Amino acid sequence: MLERRTNHDDLVDHLVRTTPLSRGEAGRVVMDVLAYFDETTEECVRRRHRELQAQGLGNTEIFERITEELPRRAVAPPALSLRQLRRIVYG
């Protein structure tokens, strides 16, 4: 069976060598990580709002936490005001 090669074969090969993951599992991990980093700022804000709300946090704490988290993303977005965060979530 011919394996399909991707643009991230070096990373998949590295994971296979350095972890107990099979090639298929390593490929799925790489694709999951890439999907995570492809998430737009708006998608990230909405996702985190839902996750934190599900934990029972109120909006004041949620927006505070999101404001602290955004600059630590791999490609940090510009600083967003509380008003901008609310617009992303509520439209």
Image (cartoon, rainbow, N blue to C red):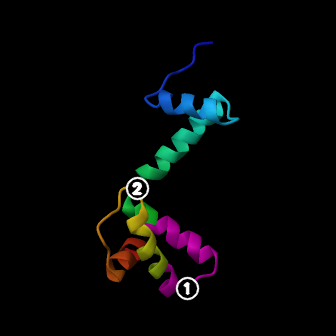
Indicate which disc residue 58 carries: 1
Q: Quadrant of the C terminus?
A: bottom left
Q: Is residue 67 left or right of residue 33?
A: left
- Number of disc labels: 2
Q: Alpha carbon of mark 1 to alpha carbon of mark 2: how far? A: 26 Å
Q: Position of residue 63 (x, y in %)?
A: 45, 80
Within 10 Å of disc 1 (Cα), the crowding (few <14, some 14-19, many 20+) is few
Considering depth in this image, is 18 or 1 the residue closer to the camera?
18
Within 10 Å of disc 2 (Cα), the crowding (few <14, some 14-19, many 20+) is few
Indicate which disc residue 31 carries: none
Q: Is residue 48 magenta?
A: yes
Say which residue appears at 36% left-offset and 82% top-offset.
82
Q: Quadrant of the N terminus?
A: top right
Tell me which secondary structure the magenta stretch mostly adopts.
Answer: helix
Q: Nearer the viewer, mark 1 or mark 2?
A: 2
Say which residue appears at 47% left-offset and 27% top-offset.
6
Say which residue appears at 64% left-offset and 76% top-offset.
55
Reading the chain from its start, which is encountered first: label 1 or label 2? 1
Q: Which residue is disc 2 drawn over?
A: 74
Q: Is residue 32 left or right of residue 85?
A: right
What element does badge 2 sit on?
Answer: loop
Q: Is residue 22 magenta?
A: no
**What amino acid does circle 1 point to?**
Gly
Which stretch appears magenta?
A: 45-62
